[in-house]
Image (spheres, grey):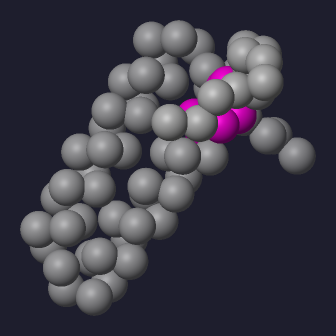
């Protein structure tokens, strides 16, 4: 397991979670495009978990709005 030099700030953590959510969403879309419905369903569940985390902790304020 990787050790951190320091804990990420709240903003860094929020940005990391948003990036991970976007990656999971892209994987879901790729699975749908290839016809892998089981994989898409699994990724969809992960995206929903990230959405819940983002909502509960208010991490959407760290989204890059540019």
Q: Quadrant of residue 62?
A: top right
Q: Where residue 65 appears, x then y in whole percent?
A: 81, 40
Residue shown at the point (50%, 24%) measured from the top left? 54
- Residue interval drawn in magenta: 13-18
Residue 14 inside the magenta-drawn segment: yes
Side of 22 relative to 33 (left or right): right
Side of 56 relative to 13 (left or right): left
Classify 9 as above or below 43: above
Q: Where residue 39 appears, x then y in whole percent?
A: 20, 68
Residue shown at the point (53%, 11%) measured from the top left? 57
Residue shown at the point (70%, 26%) measured from the top left? 4
Q: From this viewpoint, is residue 11 visible?
A: no
Q: Quadrant of residue 27?
A: bottom left
Side of 18 relative to 4 (left or right): left
Classify 29 as above or below 33: above
Side of 33 relative to 41 (left or right): right
Residue nearest the observer in this picture, 65 or 16? 16
Residue at the limit of the structure toward the left, as seen here: 38
Residue 63 inside the magenta-drawn segment: no
Prevailing secondary structure of the magenta residues: helix
Q: From this viewpoint, is residue 41 visible?
A: yes
Q: Where residue 64 appears, x then y in whole percent?
A: 79, 40
Residue shown at the point (23%, 45%) measured from the top left? 45
Residue at the limit of the structure toward the bottom, as seen here: 34
């Amino acid at each position: 397991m990787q050790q951190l030099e320091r804990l990420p700030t709240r903003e860094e953590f929020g940005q990391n979670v948003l990036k991970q959510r976007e990656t999971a969403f892209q994987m879901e879309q790729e699975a749908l495009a290839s016809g892998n419905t089981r994989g898409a369903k699994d990724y969809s569940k992960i995206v929903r978990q990230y959405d819940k985390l983002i909502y509960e902790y208010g991490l959407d304020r760290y989204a890059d709005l540019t």
